[in-house]
Image (cartoon, rainbow, N blue to C red):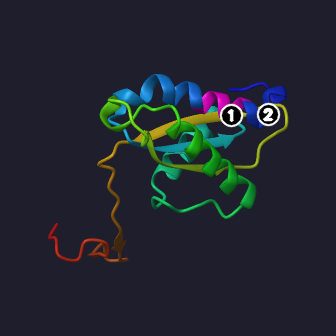
Amino acid sequence: MLMPSEGYEGVVKFVFENISTLAVNACPPVLVGVGIATSVETAAVLSRKAVLRPIGSRHPNPKAAELELRLEEGLNRLGIGPQGLTGNSSVMGVHIESAARHPSTIGVAVSTGCWAHRRGTLLVHADLSFENLSHTRSAL
């Protein structure tokens, strides 16, 4: 939880502190999800949602998309590199999800996904049968 006076500069500082100290344990390069909301609980859910967005996608809000890009560029300059052995690719992407918040609080959470991050899509029908939309050649 950040103080309101910290603003988005505080969010950036929080993300950098977390990734610079902990990302090496997450098998970099990592995918970074940032949640911003009134409570830390909501921010944590949003950060997980952000990690699940497709790599390379940008937030529909232009200001949030710019912040995603600037965070990504800055985090890559940390030089953590693949598997923490130094290099230019420390993160695969940064995604931000946010919710309406009260001006008196800034809840922030950061989640990561490792380089082997995978996502899939199932379509579940009313009768609980399903279709595997993302991996059509695999069987479940």
The furthest residue to the top: 21
Q: Residue at x 64, y 46 (%)?
A: 70
Secondary structure category for the residue under label 1: helix
Q: Residue at x 45, y 32 (%)?
A: 79
Q: Are marks 2 and 1 in contact (CB under 8 Å)?
A: yes
Q: As shown in the figure, which amino acid type bears the numbered disc 1?
A: Val
Q: Quadrant of residue 35?
A: top right
Q: Quadrant of residue 87?
A: top left
Image mark for residue 11: 1
Q: As shown in the figure, which amino acid type bears the numbered disc 2?
A: Gly
Which secondary structure class fits the magenta region best? helix
Q: Quadrant of the C terminus?
A: bottom left
Q: Quadrant of the N terminus?
A: top right
Return the x and y of residue 50 as percentages of the image width and height: 53, 51
Q: Which residue is mark 2?
A: 7
Identify which residue, 56 or 35, lies in the foreground.
Answer: 56
Q: Which residues are magenta?
A: 10-15
Residue 137 lies in the magenta-colored region = no
Instruction: Specify whether 11 is left or right of 93.
Output: right
Instruction: Specify whether 71 is left or right of 117.
Output: right
Q: Residue at x 36, y 74 (%)?
A: 123
